[in-house]
Image (tube, helix red, strand yellow):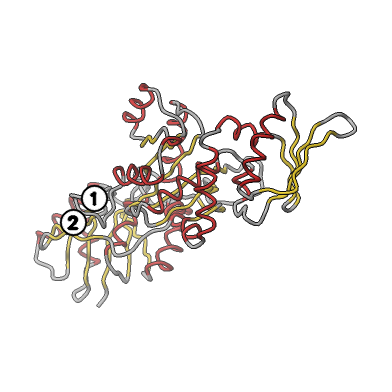
Amino acid sequence: MARILIEFFGDESAENTAPLLYGKYDRVIYFSFGGEEPGSRQREVLEELIPKKFGAEVVFLTVQNKTLGAAYRNFSELWREGDEYVFDLTGGSQLFSAAVGIFVSAAEKPGVSVAVLDIAEGTEYVQYPEYAEKSAEYKFGVDELISLCGGRVISKSKTYAEISGKSQLRSEIVRMWDAVKSIPSDWNRFCSMTNCRDGSRVKKKLSRADDKKTVERLISMLRRRDIIRNDRLYIDERGRTYLEYDLTPRAKTVEMYEKSGTVLELYTCLAAGECGSFSEVCSGVVLDLDGLITKKRGDPVNEIDVMAVYRNRPVLISCKNCKPTKEHLYEILTMAEQYGGKYAIPALVCSEPAFEPVRERASEMGVILIDNVYDTPLKKLKDILVRYFPSDRQTDDEI
């Protein structure tokens, strides 16, 4: 006896694959009408991911005539007594859904059920033969969700699993956030200075008149926190001013001292991981748009500051070390649509407070906006995230 999932192929990857998260299947059959079949890249991803993750065989069937009768006849020819069939009505052509209705009502066929998904809520609803609600048994990861939309994860800077497993790394993130949030302008300027690093030895060029004062303020702070040592300011034979220093072993995340926004990214990653709402969280995720990795200059590659998975939906977070703007909203919304599809959730986290028109535009666009993070302690940031992404482990009273 085989358990078979009947899917109707459509444009949204989540609708094509999410039913697999709710039960064990031996085979997945994707129906499509002639001219609407999946492309070669889509087939390749499904044929690779589904057997590997779910242990199910993948079959693609094409109904050449786009008619109700043709779809019904294909279902009738497919059915074999003794096997179990689950028809998923989420996505795909409505003609297939109508044909399923005729199929199940024409004659009683044992082992046939019909279900539909609420992907946003993460629930499967069995409509026939008896109504039932089911929660997901399996989970997708960031890499899998990106691949299902045709892209590929090239690399990640830090995962929350790494941060949670190393108390020193967590302490470094919190310590540096507490330090730089009170001196944002100095920190931005310090990180923007021309930087050259050889192992732990760092060399910065001071090009502006006030760079020396900035460096003196920052160096003393970093020295007190045992992040740097052996620092010196000097002028070369051409009259150019440089700062040299060694990063200590306590500097676990080197990029945090080279890019001003990295501290905010890691602080957001830490809060998202600790709030308990997400099944995976990672920062500095480099993505390839079409999933075909090349070394050509035109190959589209982007970096998402923080990515998370919420109820098997990708959450793409842009972190901006400044006031949020409407351009920032459009940027992350476009990224979410390109890399995560219809069910991706775009979010913007900014260090400074937003102007009211930007708040209003974020609400209209469906972009989650969390601003003024400089004045947001870690616990409060976690609470804000839980308000937008309620944890399945919480009760309604807790939310």
Q: Is residue 199 left or right of residue 110?
A: right
* Label 2: which secondary element: strand
Q: For mark 2, what is the residue?
A: 125
Where's residue 246, x and y in %?
Answer: 72, 49
* Label 1: which secondary element: strand
Instruction: Give residue 343's mark.
Output: none
Q: Residue at x 62, y 41 (%)?
A: 221
Q: How many callouts does the rendering have? A: 2
**Which residue in the rendered view is the most extreme toward the right?**
237
Q: Residue at x 26, y 55 (%)?
A: 392
Counting residues from the N terminus, which is met first, the one under dot 1 or under dot 2? 1
Where's residue 87, x and y in %?
Answer: 22, 60
Q: Is residue 112 left or right of residue 93?
A: left
- Disc 1 versus disc 2: distance between alpha carbons? 8 Å
| Residue type for callout 1 | Asp
Category of crowding for the residue at label 1, using alpha-carbon neighbours closer than 10 angstroms: few (below 14), some (14–19), many (at least 20):
few
For the residue pair 242 and 80, the one nearer the viewer reads as 242
Q: The N terminus is located in which quarter?
A: bottom left
Q: Is residue 264 left or right of residue 187?
A: left
Q: Is residue 70 visible?
A: no
- In the rendered image of this protein, does residue 30 appear above or below residue 271? below
Where's residue 171, x and y in %?
Answer: 51, 53
| Residue type for callout 2 | Tyr
Q: For mark 1, what is the residue?
A: 118
Is there CB contact under 8 Å for labels 1 and 2? yes
Q: Is residue 266 visible?
A: yes
Q: Residue at x 54, y 58 (%)?
A: 168
Where's residue 213, x and y in %?
Answer: 69, 29
For the residue pair 167 and 265, the one nearer the viewer reads as 167
Category of crowding for the residue at label 2, using alpha-carbon neighbours closer than 10 angstroms: few (below 14), some (14–19), many (at least 20):
some
- In the rendered image of this protein, does residue 183 appear above or below residue 84? above
